[in-house]
Amino acid sequence: MKIGFIDSGIGGLSVMKAFISYPILADYFYIADTAHLPYGLKTHDYIHDRVEKLTHYLINTHHIDCLVIACNTATAISAEKLRKQMPNFPIIGIEPAIKPAALASKSKEIAILATTSMINNPRLTRLIHEFASDVSVIKIAADRWVTLVEQGIFSGPKADAAIHETLQPLSDHSIDQLILGCTHFPFLETELRSILNSEIVLVNPAAAVAKHTLHSLDQHHIEANTSSTYHYLTTGDLKHFQHQISPLQMPEGAVCTLAV
């Protein structure tokens, strides 16, 4: 099987890691659309145009069997549109884990960290209305964290300062669930855990997405490989991309540029 991943940058690699750990044996094709980063501050039309172009590239050139939109913002904007265009093709998105966080909360206060686009997206409002109507949900825009991760800053004074500043609104609340509503944010998990109260659970839906994808592939009778290969593509600067992924401990594979 061949699985394609799309994100604005390297954040979606946190999702791909969950697939590898599950494990799901496949030929992996990951696109970091770094020439158009960040998605979170772009218009919906702009984002959908990018996701659509990259999807058709993966299908037509690499003949993927399944697409994973490894970006919360892009999922909210493009997933349903693409499914209507290709109803028989498995398209998996990633969404903020509002439902499990709300169900697990004992304090009845939870928070979500996401991009500005995701925070303002009607899809998030509907998820909260449907699954967290009896829970207080604090929404915090953390676009700055995307930049940190793209710069390879996962810890240290700069990350610490940015995280403290972003989390300041939580000081007046007693949340017990913190939803990582952007695939870049799990790369800051170590720093987050050093700052947050140990009783606060960090909610990352990546493992659930991997499980759901495997189920979808089974339904489409797409069999797993006996081994995996890895292909990393960027629409931006190749050397910078290689430098970005080197500390992430991803499996070795082909790394190249993509002009789409």
Image: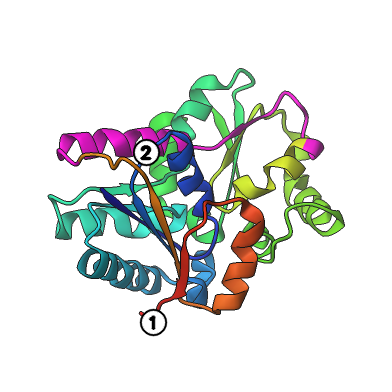
**Label 1: few (<14), some (14–19) or many (≥20) C-alpha neighbours in 10 Å:** few
Residue 206: x %, y % from top left: 47, 40
Going 46% across and 48% down the picture, which residue do you hit? 16
Mark linked to residue 229: none
Is residue 101 in view? Answer: yes
Residue toward you, 231 or 5:
231
From the viewer's perspective, is 15 left or right of 244? left
Residue 144: x %, y % from top left: 67, 62
Q: Quadrant of residue 210?
A: top left
Quadrant location, the C terminus: bottom left
| Labels 1 and 2: the sequence-earlier one | 2
**Residue at which label 2 appears:** 24
- What is the three-letter code of the residue carrying label 1? Ala
> Is 73 in the magenta?
no
Going 43% across and 33% down the picture, which residue do you hit? 22
Going 82% across and 51% down the picture, which residue do you hit? 160
Which region is colored magenta? 194-222
Can you say whether 235 is above or below 66 in the image? below
Circle 1 SS class = loop
From the viewer's perspective, is 224 left or right of 236? left
**Residue at which label 1 appears:** 259
Is residue 141 in view? Answer: no
**Label 2: few (<14), some (14–19) or many (≥20) C-alpha neighbours in 10 Å:** many
Residue toward you, 185 or 168:
185
Circle 2 SS class = loop
- Residue lying farthest to the top in this orientation: 106
